[in-house]
Image (tube, rainbow, N blue to C red):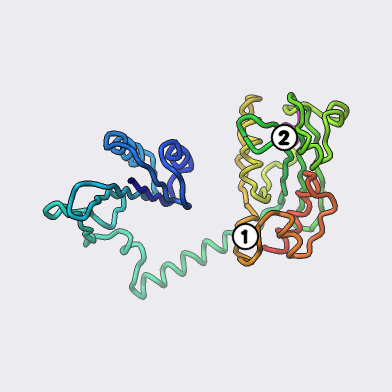
Amino acid sequence: MIVITLSKVPASLRGDLTKWCQKVQTGVYVGNFNSKIRDLLWDKIVKNCGSGEATLVYSTNNELGYNFRTTRSDIEVVDCDGIPLVKALADNPALEELGYSKAAKIHKAKVMKRKLSNVTTPKMVVSLDLETTGLDVNKDEIISIGAVKEDITGKRENFYRLIQCKTKIPKKIADLTGISDGVLAKNGVEISVALKDLKKFIGESLIIGYNVSFDIDFLNRSLDENSEEHIVNSVKDMMPVAKKANVFLDDYRLETVLDYFKIKNNHPHNSLGDATATLDLAKRLL
């Protein structure tokens, strides 16, 4: 049995790790493979964990029945007659960084005040939503893009495109969204055209959405396929904000959260309708 814990590591490393281990909780991976694979995997983790931290615990033939390794800089794993012990390092950079003295606390407060004074409200916010033929970013397609842009005065502008689809739309998706093959054939545009229009509409705005990483992943894959640059705007996901606002909901689907906050969505499962409702939700939560 092998257990690996990760903290603040690149998403690409987490993805690679799922090829060998099962993710049982955020940052916790469990696997069962031989020592050679374990050592090679640990080398890969060390090389690719960036500024994050990783710890590996594995079964072995010692008195405890296990051993472990870690990339943490504040401790050291010491072998004591075959028993792994944790030694706290005297020169602990994590403790030094905290600054326990009164002078250090005052200095940190001044630095934070300067940082906050430099924070500006974005001039434009764009709420984004997609409808797709399915959930698999590697094989499914975008069938509509909806976005709502709002400036600091509250003035809004809408963006909506139906996208021509290479594959037949599944019946359950057509029933859910109201978008059929016939609708796309008549009113859809090529994805390359829609992407150019969307990037122009977004500009340098802050992008918000609900589970918005899903939408960004689909867009960036389509941008790759059309030899266009990825979307690099700042992004804010409303789902974790909603979870912090109320932890007692039965689920955190968009419709459930909107219902809790009494926000009306006139066109659910329509990309423009969902984007509009998400913007209303963001204004309520933030």
**Residue 241 badge:** 1
Query: In the rendering, at what x and y percent does residue 152 appear?
Result: 75, 57
Which residue range is magenta in the image?
A: 193-199
**Crowding near the residue tagged with mark 2, few <14, some 14–19, many ≥20 C-alpha atoms within 10 Å:** many
Identity of the residue drawn at 29% across and 53% down: 73
Query: In the rendering, at what x and y percent does residue 257 appear?
Result: 71, 60
Rendered image quadrant of residue 32? top left
- Look at label 1 and name its amino acid: Val
Closest to the observer, 53 or 40: 40
Image quarter in which the C terminus is found: bottom right
Q: Is residue 123 left or right of residue 66?
A: right
**Crowding near the residue tagged with mark 1, few <14, some 14–19, many ≥20 C-alpha atoms within 10 Å:** some
Closest to the observer, 48 or 203: 48
Instruction: Give the residue pinned by disc 2.
Output: 133
Q: Is residue 113 left or right of residue 161?
A: left
Indicate yes or no whether the magenta region holds residue 182.
Answer: no
Query: In the rendering, at what x and y percent does residue 205 appear?
Result: 68, 47
By secondary structure, the bulk of the magenta-drawn segment is best described as helix
